[in-house]
Amino acid sequence: MKEHKMNKSKKSTQQKVIHLQEGDTVKQLIDKLDIKGRDFLEKLASDGLDVSVNDIVDEYLSQKISQSFNLKIKISTIEEEMKAQAEKDPQQMVTRPPVVAMLGHVDHGKTTLLDAIRQSNLVRKESGGITQHVGAYRISYKDKPITFIDTPGHEAFTQLRSRGAQITDIVILVVAADDGVMPQTKEAINHARAAGVPIMVAINKIDKEGVDLDKVKQQLSKEGLLIEDWGGDTVSVEVSATKKKNLNELLEMILLLSEMEEFKANPNIKAQGVILESRLDTKKGPLATVIVQHGILHRGDPFISNITYGKAKALFDENSKTLKRADASMPVEILGFTDVPTAGDIFQVVSDLETAKKISDFRKSQLQKEKGPRPERMTLDQLFQKMEEGEVKELRLVIKADVQGSVEVLNDLLPNLGSDQVKINILHSATGKITESDVLLASASDAIIIGYNTRANQKIQDMASNENVEIRTYKVIYKLTEDIKKALKGMLEPTVKETYLGEAEVRQIFRISRVGTVAGCYVRNGKISRNAKIKVSRNGEIIHEGQISSLKHFKENVTEITKNHECGISLEKFKDIQEGDLIRAYLTEKEKLE
């Protein structure tokens, strides 16, 4: 009897567990309790909490309510709830296609290998011959789909390769037979192991003379990858991407390993996936590539991804073909985000747009609480004060890039190039073209603007020139880092400064035998000089940069033509001039970056 009373007493003091989803209000909490709303609020007021039924239950409020009512409140994200729901019932899980990541050292042939498998031509699209972004592509082999992720091999893209390994089912480690195991090869192995992903090895470039395959396998064994024909359990296929040799064998092994691993997905929940890459398109707006992991994504679905949300206005495959739906393991580009999402974040379909907005607003408010108020002016004042006092020298940068993944890489990479004597301070970084606000920020803070795979239009260039702001654009990351290192050492190569001369409008085109194409022009302002360099723009976009081959006033050769006069202009190595084009003349001079 005594023991029974003790158990009863213990049960009465046991905390009740209430499960809430982030963004839920006090009213939704009250609905889950056996208590009147008025009594609930009065109790909180007596404990010193001024709360309304419309207040959102955040971590702080949940702790206070838990103390007042002897509750245990668990707040979970919608992504956590949906994932738990997806994996709750094994009977609902179905087999899905594998997601395969190509990892390895730079120039070992990852993209060329994928290019050969797809019979496409991805390599020509890459700047400097190296992959700059993460791409996802689907192929079909023996009527079975396989999704490939092509990740950059350059050392600066450790973060992107890590992300590739974490969302993939199988890693194919591409090792060049003529080069062997290199630093980023080892790095890729570590990423795959950290993610618990099975590794296959593709020994590439076996068509080259003098390659020693046993040496490569020996190097792999030192890294803990013992190849099957050496008595180990690591699958290895010897291939040649350029000769398209043994590609079918590689695909066969992928399908075999997939059958053994039995990759599963639940098609019966709202779609969930991972943002693989994101970018800001000047015409379409924010876009993101998503790998679907559970559920089926439909056009028109509302969604949330961290603090961004939206509605899937359009779905595209890797060839920009529109889709109505995307199944598990399928890569899809989505149009409809309110802002550019962050690569690596979870993508989650929700019931309606209002729910998505509510969750987004809640997360933004929580983020703002963590960051606190932004001391915008104070930061710059403190910065200038430190420089004047000689405490620290800084190279200030404004970073703009074409995709979010590149922004993240540059944010991680560039500050590490600094030293105790000279710091690198990234004032602002974002995706998209270089804008007026970027120039104004750089001007106010004496910063340099770095454009990576993005550029500034002529209006922005003129504004930067007037504000004495330098804009440097790059297509290959190692050239960017080389220049930053030189700048830090005061050894940067002279930059080219443009001095504007004038502008002429093309009003008529003449095709003259033995002479070629001559543009009949009217000088709208300034002057056009025979020795000047020119930029031809059409509809606001620069389509050609070069030099003048001849400048005539009527039939006479002249050295320059001034404002409000007509002239004939022939351009070197450019015949596609059209009526309405603008020819901008300028001179260049070299100047050192201080």
Image (cartoon, rainbow, N blue to C red):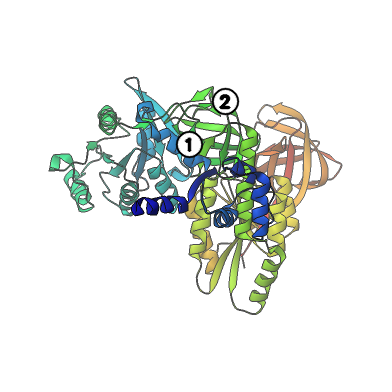
Q: Is residue 339 visible?
A: no
Residue 251 position, x and y percent, is: 29, 29
Furthest toward the right, the residue is: 564
Mark nearest the camera among 2 and 1 is 1
Residue that badge 1 annotates:
82
Furthest toward the front, the residue is: 1
Q: Which part of the image, by quadrant, shows the C terminus?
A: bottom right
Looking at the picture, which amino acid does disc 1 mark?
Answer: Met
The residue shown at (71%, 52%) is: 437
- Residue 285 shown left or right of residue 408 in the figure: right
- Residue 512 shown left or right of residue 80 in the figure: right
For residue 258, what is the image quadrant? top left
Residue 280 position, x and y percent, is: 61, 40
Q: Determine crowd level at label 2: few under 14, some 14-19, many 20+ residues with C-alpha closer than 10 A.
A: some
Residue that badge 2 annotates:
299
Q: Nearer the viewer, residue 369 or 536?
A: 369
Looking at the picture, which amino acid does disc 2 mark?
Answer: Arg
Residue 182 position, x and y percent, is: 30, 52
The residue shown at (33%, 46%) is: 192
The residue shown at (41%, 37%) is: 149
For residue 578, what is the image quadrant? top right
**Looking at the picture, does residue 474 appear above or below residue 394?**
above
| Residue 512 marker | none
Q: CA distance from mark 2 to mark 1?
A: 20 Å
